[in-house]
Image (cartoon, coloured by chain):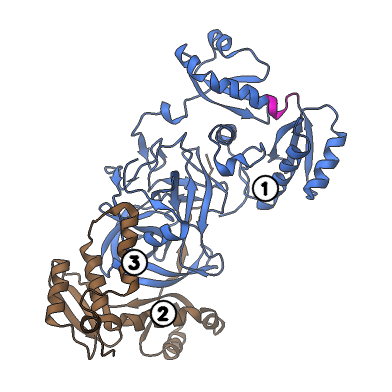
Chain colours: A blue, B brown
């Protein structure tokens, strides 16, 4: 859901994760942002302008280019160049981008090339530093500070000496956040499951909207996390527990029209998250393995199944009808879309449960799409998109084995 | 009714193209040769009864029922084969409308959703109800509105008052 802008205090961390991913991991969507920092704003037009400006700046002045970001306070797209003479730079960038708008140029000391070179040097030395007892939790290019950020437990003279006293490096103290440094099997609640991702936990989009993760999936070897398509837009960055999962890579939802699928697949940064075939079913069953996929044509009336959502938790019921057409509305009662081929159940679900995994035992059935009557009522209703169709429409495969 | 059932024309396991494709899909999902007895039974009954198949469902007491369009019979041998696949006994129930007919009626109504909305009808869901052997439509409106909708959609449809279905994103939170 797109919505009003919000600020995120974990912004710098997200920026760094994003940049690390783009530079070190080389995931497709992130490598193409032209050194732009985390698009932490839900305004598509502003983002498009920012992306155009950023691409133009990098193409026109590769030696001077130092990155760009959105200044949320001023609504300006900021382009940074390693020069003291900005007069020639601005006009050319704006002309090429063909996107007149709020643009601000900043003069900085170091170019992106210099920052990248320094960052690469830090990455190369990470193993050596670890052997010296200096563990870097994360590192990345912070374009707003025009520096390479290096995060450690504690900044000691030994660490400063070992990492190097370069002007380009800014050290900071930080909690460990990378996957290898978080204990395996840590899953305190639906709000905090790291680093082993799974279905049934809270997802948050850039506007703050909450949905529930469905099932873990993959496309070839790329790890993905499924949820409902109506929850987020393509390319929106999704987080869990304040840590970036990645952008929405694939999405099917008939906005305002008619279609048969309500599903999306979110990139799951393999450096930060470990893929599983688990679902967080209940407090005492946080490791429900998914081992098979239900064929949509084998669903039958009165079949018993359950869902696990962040709002209403683990609730169960029976299939009432299959192949149902549902006219879906939003919370305000406005028509949103017509979904065909949905399975209609007596399971209850409420706002926040969209995308929840629908399953029975170790078999995946579908992703929660909509609900009718709140929990606590005998005639509660929930509809879902069958998982087999989700797979074929998104071109993904639900994980049925532990990687 | 169709006089030439697959059981007599093409042999009991000659499933139509769409049914055979399910097996291939499962295999490609890495599920290997795992067999789902319900899926196999469903496929067998669809193949055997063809367009006279009225659905397979379970009653709340746990017993299984297969709907068979009136005027058609599921032979004893075919029923035994289906029960063998399912691992449970199945009761046959004559139905007026086949599942194919119900599904076609759902598509017909779905295709006219905009027109129905223009007529002032607020429809929430449309789906085949195999147990009641009707197309179930839930809608909003006065008793007169629902009566008019019922009359418009015909006897194979059962209109009732329902609740709106809503997408379920949670309200915005601090993204932290």
Q: Quadrant of residue A305?
A: bottom left
Q: Is residue A113 magenta?
A: yes
Mark 1 neighbour class, 10 Å CA radius: few under 14, some 14 to 19, many 20 or more: some
Mark 2 neighbour class, 10 Å CA radius: few under 14, some 14 to 19, many 20 or more: many
Residue at image coords 32%, 49%: A400
Q: Quadrant of the N terminus of chain B?
A: bottom left
Residue at image coords 41%, 79%: B106
Q: CA distance from mark 2 to mark 3?
A: 24 Å
Residue A98: x, y in percent? 79, 50
Please tell me whether mark 3 sits on a helix, a strand or a loop.
Answer: helix
Q: Which residue is disc 2 drawn over?
A: B106
Earlier in the chain: of badge 2 and badge 3, it is 3
Please tell me whether mark 1 sits on a helix, a strand or a loop.
Answer: helix
Residue A183: x, y in percent? 36, 28
* Above or below: residue A246 compared with residue A126: below
Residue A401: x, y in percent? 31, 45
* Above or below: residue A242 compared with residue A168: below
* Above or below: residue A275 compared with residue B142: above
Image: magenta residue range: A109-114
Q: Chain of mark 3?
A: B
User: Disc 3 vs disc 1: which is toward the camera?
Assistant: 3
Front residue of this view, candidates B141 and B15: B15
- As drawn, the label of residue A47 is 1
Residue A249: x, y in percent? 53, 50
Q: Chain of mark 1?
A: A
Q: Which residue is disc 3 drawn over?
A: B21
Mark 3 neighbour class, 10 Å CA radius: few under 14, some 14 to 19, many 20 or more: few
- Total number of numbered discs in the rendering: 3
Pick out the residue farthest to the front: B10
Please tell me whether mark 2 sits on a helix, a strand or a loop.
Answer: helix
User: Are labels 1 and 2 on one chain?
Assistant: no
């Amino acid at each position: 859901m797109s919505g009003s802008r919000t600020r995120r205090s974990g912004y710098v961390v997200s920026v760094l994760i994003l940049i690390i991913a783009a530079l070190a991991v080389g995931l497709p969507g992130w490598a193409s942002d032209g050194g732009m920092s985390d698009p932490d704003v839900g305004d598509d037009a502003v983002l498009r302008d920012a992306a155009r400006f950023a691409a133009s700046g990098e193409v026109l002045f590769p030696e001077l280019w130092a990155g760009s970001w959105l200044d949320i306070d001023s609504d300006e797209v900021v382009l940074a160049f390693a020069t003291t003479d900005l007069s020639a730079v601005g006009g050319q960038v704006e002309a090429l981008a063909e996107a007149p708008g709020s643009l601000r140029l900043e003069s900085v000391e170091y170019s992106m090339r210099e920052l990248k070179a320094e960052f690469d040097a830090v990455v190369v030395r990470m193993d050596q530093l670890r052997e010296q007892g200096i563990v870097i939790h994360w590192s990345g290019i912070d374009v707003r500070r025009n520096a390479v950020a290096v995060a450690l437990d504690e900044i000691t003279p030994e660490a400063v000496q070992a990492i190097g006293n370069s002007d380009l490096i800014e050290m900071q103290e930080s909690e460990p956040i990378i996957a290898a440094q978080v204990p395996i099997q840590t899953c305190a609640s639906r709000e905090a499951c790291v680093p082993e991702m799974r279905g049934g936990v809270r997802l948050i989009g850039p506007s703050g909207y909450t949905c529930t993760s469905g099932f873990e999936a993959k496309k070839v070897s790329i790890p993905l996390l499924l949820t409902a398509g109506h929850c987020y837009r393509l390319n929106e960055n999704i987080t869990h527990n304040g840590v970036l999962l990645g952008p929405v890579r694939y999405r099917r939802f008939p906005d305002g029209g008619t279609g048969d699928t309500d599903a999306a697949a979110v990139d799951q940064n393999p450096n930060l998250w470990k893929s599983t075939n688990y679902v967080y079913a209940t407090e005492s069953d946080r490791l429900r393995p998914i081992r098979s996929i239900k064929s949509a044509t084998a669903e039958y009336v009165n079949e018993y199944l359950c869902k696990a959502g962040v709002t209403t938790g683990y609730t169960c019921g029976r299939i009432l009808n299959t192949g149902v057409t549902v006219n879906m509305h939003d919370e305000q009662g406005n028509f949103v879309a017509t979904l065909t081929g949905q399975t209609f159940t007596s399971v209850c679900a409420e706002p926040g449960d969209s995308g929840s995994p629908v399953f029975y035992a170790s078999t995946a059935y579908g992703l929660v799409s909509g609900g009718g009557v709140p929990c606590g009522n005998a005639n509660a209703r929930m509809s879902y998109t069958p998982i087999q169709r989700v797979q074929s429409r998104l071109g993904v495969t639900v994980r049925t084995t532990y990687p | 009714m169709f006089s030439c059932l697959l059981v007599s024309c093409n042999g009991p396991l000659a499933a139509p193209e769409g049914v055979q494709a399910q097996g291939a899909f499962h295999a490609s999902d890495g599920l290997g040769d795992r067999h789902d007895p319900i899926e196999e039974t469903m496929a067998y009954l669809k193949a055997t009864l063809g367009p006279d198949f009225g659905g397979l469902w379970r009653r709340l007491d746990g017993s299984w029922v297969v709907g068979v369009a009136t005027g058609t019979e599921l032979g004893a041998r075919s029923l035994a084969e289906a029960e063998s696949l399912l691992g449970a006994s199945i009761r046959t129930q004559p139905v007026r409308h086949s599942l194919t007919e119900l599904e076609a009626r759902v598509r017909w109504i779905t295709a006219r959703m905009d027109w129905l909305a223009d007529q002032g009808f607020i429809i929430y869901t449309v789906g085949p109800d195999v147990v009641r052997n009707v197309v179930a439509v839930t809608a909003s409106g006065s008793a007169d509105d629902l009566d008019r909708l019922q009359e418009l959609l015909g006897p194979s449809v059962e209109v009732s008052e329902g609740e709106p279905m809503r997408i379920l994103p949670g309200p915005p939170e601090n993204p932290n």
